[in-house]
């Protein structure tokens, strides 16, 4: 049974659609809005990068897409699946079609299972192959993700693999049930720099070969450029900019997107910019020393996110309007920005 002939169909048709997705976490001490009216789509066979620093809501969104969390408001659909309304029994079936590649490959693998067992299990559980069929298919998948020679890797356990090999195993497990969508949550951030490009290239090759879609979650706009067709930039749970990846990278409009580009070394430039911390936490240094205007108080800037733009406290373009209302996404079909003082 060849990988791309029977079990692995390249005719994927399911589109991921998020509409006005909001997620609120409450406890006795505080209420946190992790996501605010997030809307975007991932078309069949496409890669969309979800970009933002820690605390921007990327992982929360991934958990909602995979059905681990439910949104407080809004809807999530994958093809005919209304994800936010699925019961537990339905979620078990749904997860055949949506698989996750985690940031830490070691903690996401069962340390007692061999490489072969790790791949065989989803083939039997989701595709209902018998043991012999599953083992043959697992060996094909090992060849595909380059865990070769297969006879040397089949009986190894996770602690006997390198970081890159463990991530290849996680990817092999994810593609085994022939999913419509892979959610890759910072899949290379814990790997050695020398092998990151290989893992990203592998994901892209599998996407082209199987026709699956990929939601690629990262803090790195330049790796997003290498991988993605489109990009969605998140800041404190708000979509601040989105569009065609080349258009957004080349003509970034939102101040936060511009700072993300400055914060990461650009492989397309000979000289690399100085890194900045841009996680938006209260303890982080300001991006610019901005003289306070009479009508824009420091208190107003720091608390603008309650009703105004979430980036107002750190933005050099801040105006009175930014403190009063949240801007909406505006622009063209290929590029939209959420900013009162910038337009596409």
Image (tube, rainbow, N blue to C red):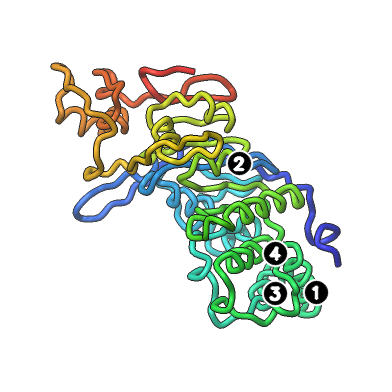
The disc label shown at residue 112, or none: none
- Of the image marks 3 and 2, the number of the one nearer the N terminus: 3
Judging by the rendered image, the residue that carries numbered circle 4 is 176
User: Quick check: 230 left or right of 178?
Assistant: left
The disc label shown at residue 120, or none: 3
- Of the image marks 1 and 3, the number of the one nearer the N terminus: 3
- Coordinates of residue 153 in the picture (x, y in percent): 69, 77
- Of the image marks 2 and 1, the number of the one nearer the N terminus: 1
Judging by the rendered image, the residue that carries numbered circle 2 is 226
Does 156 sit above or below residue 189?
below
User: Is disc 4 placed on a helix, strand or loop?
Assistant: loop
Query: How far is the residue under mark 3 from the one under mark 2?
Result: 31 Å
- Of the image marks 3 and 4, the number of the one nearer the N terminus: 3
Judging by the rendered image, the residue that carries numbered circle 1 is 136
User: Quick check: 36 left or right of 105?
Assistant: left
Q: Is residue 39 visible?
A: no
């Amino acid at each position: 049974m060849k990988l791309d002939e029977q079990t692995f169909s390249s005719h994927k048709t399911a589109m991921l659609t998020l509409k006005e997705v909001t997620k609120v976490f409450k406890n006795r001490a505080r209420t946190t809005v992790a996501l605010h009216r997030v809307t975007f789509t991932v078309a069949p066979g496409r890669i969309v990068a979800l970009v933002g620093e820690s605390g921007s809501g990327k992982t929360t969104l991934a958990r909602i897409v995979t059905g681990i969390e439910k949104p407080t408001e809004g809807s999530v659909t994958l093809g005919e699946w209304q994800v936010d309304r699925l019961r537990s029994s339905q979620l078990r079936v749904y997860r055949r079609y949506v698989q996750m590649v985690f940031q830490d490959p070691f903690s996401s693998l069962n340390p007692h299972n061999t490489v072969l067992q790790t791949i065989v299990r989803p083939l039997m559980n989701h595709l209902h192959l018998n043991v012999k069929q599953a083992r043959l298919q697992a060996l094909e998948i090992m060849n595909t993700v380059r865990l070769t020679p297969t006879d040397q890797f089949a009986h190894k356990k996770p602690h006997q693999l390198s970081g890159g090999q463990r991530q290849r195993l996680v990817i092999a497990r994810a593609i085994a049930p022939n999913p419509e969508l892979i959610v890759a949550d910072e899949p290379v951030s814990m790997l050695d720099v020398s092998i990151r490009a290989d893992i990203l290239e592998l994901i892209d090759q599998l996407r082209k070969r199987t026709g699956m879609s990929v939601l690629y979650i990262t803090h790195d706009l330049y790796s997003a450029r290498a991988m993605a067709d489109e990009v969605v930039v998140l800041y404190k749970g708000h979509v601040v900019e989105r569009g065609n990846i080349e258009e957004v990278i080349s003509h970034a409009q939102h101040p936060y997107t511009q700072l993300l580009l400055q914060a990461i070394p650009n492989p397309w430039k000979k000289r690399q910019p100085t890194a900045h911390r841009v996680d938006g936490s209260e303890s982080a240094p300001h991006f610019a020393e901005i003289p306070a205007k009479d009508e824009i108080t420091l208190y107003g800037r720091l608390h603008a996110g309650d009703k105004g733009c979430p980036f107002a406290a750190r933005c050099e373009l801040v105006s009175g309007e930014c403190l009063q209302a949240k801007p909406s996404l505006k622009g063209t079909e290929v590029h939209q920005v959420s900013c009162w003082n910038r337009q596409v």
